[in-house]
């Protein structure tokens, strides 16, 4: 990747990025100012570049794009092999769809599980927002495991 224009910070504005991708035979990236006659040069202009296509990267790219930013999401892996998909560890949220549940109980369990060493402000935010995040993911088409009666 070669940068033609450094990110410019405009007072009250967003950063702007420009980069050019050059290819070569042994498939290693090479910074060059020369235009190759053997390989095509592809110029891209983005307001934001998100590196990583796991859950956090895809959600960040989606949010930026939804907010009107011209966004690129790049990954070294095939998107379905990014870590969130490969981990298969599940997601925790106090949905209250199977039995009585509350995000505060989830908060307490998480803080206790961290031996009270976890960032309690971050845990508070995560556990309070988790049910809405799960519903959002379901609305995007996330294939959650379900019970026989269709509950997550």
Image (spheres, grey):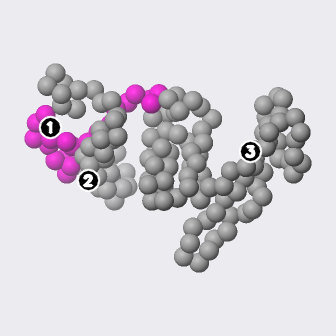
Residue 129 percent across, percent down from the top left: 28, 52
> In the rendered image, which quarter is residue 14 located in?
bottom right
Q: Main secondary structure of the magenta part?
A: loop
Mark nearest the camera among 3 and 1 is 3
The magenta-colored residue range is: 85-105
Q: Is residue 81 above or below residue 14?
A: above
- Side of 131 relative to 39 (left or right): left
* Label 3 Cα crowd, 10 Å radius (few <14 / some 14-19 / many 20+): few
Mark nearest the camera among 2 and 3 is 3
Residue 151 percent across, percent down from the top left: 18, 31
- Residue 112 visible to the viewer: no
> In the rendered image, which quarter is residue 150 located in?
top left
Q: Nearer the viewer, residue 42 or 78?
A: 42
Residue 126 percent across, percent down from the top left: 32, 51
* Label 1 Cα crowd, 10 Å radius (few <14 / some 14-19 / many 20+): few
Marks 2 and 3, the one that precedes in the sequence: 3
Where disc 3 sits, the SS reads strand
In magenta stretch: residue 104: yes
For marks 2 and 3, give the CA distance. Answer: 44 Å
Marks 1 and 2, the one that precedes in the sequence: 1
* Dots 3, 1 in contact, CB < 8 A: no
For marks 3 and 1, give the CA distance. Answer: 49 Å
The residue at the point 30 percent across, 30 percent down is 144
Residue denoted by label 1: 97
Q: Any mark on residue 42, and which?
A: 3
The residue at the point 57 percent across, 30 percent down is 78
Residue denoted by label 2: 128
The residue at the point 50 percent across, 33 percent down is 83
In magenta stretch: residue 3: no
Q: Is residue 122 above or below residue 112?
A: below
Where disc 2 sits, the SS reads helix
């Amino acid at each position: 990747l070669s940068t033609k224009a450094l990110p410019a910070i405009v007072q009250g504005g967003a950063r702007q990025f420009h980069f050019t991708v050059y290819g070569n035979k042994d498939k290693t990236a090479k910074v060059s100012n020369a235009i190759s006659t053997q390989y095509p040069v592809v110029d891209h202009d983005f307001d934001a570049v998100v590196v990583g296509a796991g859950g956090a990267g895809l959600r960040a790219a989606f949010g930026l794009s939804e907010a009107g930013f011209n966004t690129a999401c790049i990954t070294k892996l095939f998107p379905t092999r990014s870590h969130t998909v490969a981990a298969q560890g599940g997601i925790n949220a106090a949905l209250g769809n199977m039995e009585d549940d509350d995000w505060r109980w989830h908060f307490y369990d998480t803080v206790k599980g961290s031996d009270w060493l976890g960032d309690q402000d971050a845990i508070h935010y995560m556990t309070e927002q988790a049910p809405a995040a799960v519903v959002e993911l379901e609305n995007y088409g996330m294939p959650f495991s379900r019970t026989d009666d269709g509950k997550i």
